Amino acid sequence: MKLTVIGTGYVGLVSGVCFALGGHHVICVDKDEEKIKKLKQMESPIYEPGIEELIELNLREERLSFSADLQDSVRHSDIIILAVGTPSLPNGEADLTYIEGAAAEIAKAMDGHKIIMTKSTVPVGTNEKISKMLSKFTHHSFDIVSAPEFLREGSAIRDTLHPDRIVIGLDNPELEPTMRELHKGFTENVFVTDIRSAEMIKYASNAFLATKISFINEIANICEKVGADVTEVAQGMGMDQRIGSSFLQAGIGYGGSCFPKDTNALIQIAGNVDYEFKLLKSVVEVNKGQRFMIISKLHESLGSLRGSTIGIWGLAFKPNTDDVREAPAREIVEALVAEGATVKLYDPIAATNFRQQYDHPQLRWCNLPEEAAEGSDAVCLLTDWSLLKDIDLHQLAKSMRNGVLIDGRNVYSKEQIEGTGLVYHSVGRPQMGGLSGYSASVAGAV
């Protein structure tokens, strides 16, 4: 099949590369001509393990191309995939400016029947708006399909090629064979439904996963007070097939481009139909407060932070990505600066992106995790990069001024900590260094 993918962010680029790998001819379109130039040189604008190798392979096999010319690309394709951004507006609603603009351009470029497939995360009813916009600008026939993505940054290629399921929303049942053929080889688990339900499935899925994260973090905070181990609790819970073990890792909360945006958007979607989503509002509130647990544990260990030096390990919202959108590190670092600390920052991939968004004279940028720890009063692990799991903790303790280690992702085991001399705090593991006095109210005081 001949495809045009509009947008070369995580969703668009990964989808385009993977569809090309499946044997389809794909044109990835972006208005940013500099980005297109780099892609033609096999330089990916996003950090995603394996993406550049697949770009090179598909270019060599002539299944993939890149263009800034949307009109020409649309005319040479049968299926047009919308994968542009839907960022949050100040009120939490999804901004559909890019979607609407792309739809208008597609309509004006159409020279025959096209299938318009939306992979961007959009509020319920958006595809109907797209249909009306297309009808406004073109007399050619078309079909609309909703095919929300469920990829995770850092494992996006694997998630696209080997998904748990593929959701297809359509109102024309005659399209089902075409959609199944398009996704052939990815998975046999294809769920076909109506368009509005497909749109809602994406939001409901992300909201539920965010709920699991906030729930286990609340359990972790209780575990610290009652002497239970949240890792053991989560393991025991996860053995129940009705619950499952995924997304039950206690820590400093979720971030990134999806969960914060989609939970807020779903709250607004509910509000627009006069329904208050109380549960999801609490999930968001818990997540916002959880990251400030780091500050509370620093206070317990060091007292005032004014004049202290704090090392930070990890700035990305999760490992294997350079994405710092809504990363907990941002608010934690800002809080440390506000309290008068000098902050030494390290991340193997995301430091440049973080620095573009936030810099300050009290920040020191480091090239190695050991550099961020040397001479520091405390080190806070905020992103569980695999290389941090192998740090020599005995040597770490010797290089620090005060050997306080706040493990915000429960990376280290009791065996690794014993004998190091470190004052160690984890999340929800009191026998590993819990926090007896933590209260969610602390977050509001920072």
Image (cartoon, rainbow, N blue to C red):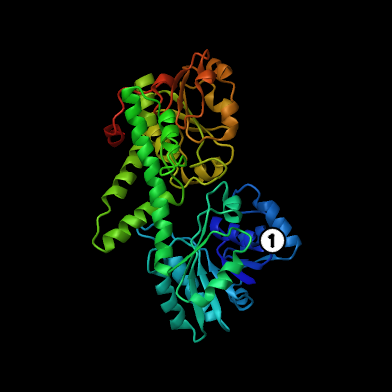
Find disc 1 in the rendering and name its residue. 40
Pick the front one: 58 or 304: 58
Residue 195 appears in which quarter of the rendering? bottom left
Relative height, residue 442 to residue 270 (above, below): above
Image position, residue 90 (x, y; %):
34, 56
Q: Residues within 10 Å of mark 1 (few under 14, many from 20)?
A: some
Residue closest to the far right: 60
Q: Amino acid at mark 1?
A: Lys
Residue pictured at 54% horizontal, 40% vertical = 319
On the picture, is 350 further left or further right than 209?
right
Residue pictured at 31% horizontal, 55% vertical = 267
Image position, residue 198 (x, y; %):
43, 64
Residue 7 appears in which quarter of the rendering? bottom right
Pick the front one: 165 or 25: 165
Relative height, residue 134 to residue 332 (above, below): below
Image position, residue 439 (x, y; %):
29, 30
Look at the image and tell me whether residue 319 can be seen.
Answer: yes
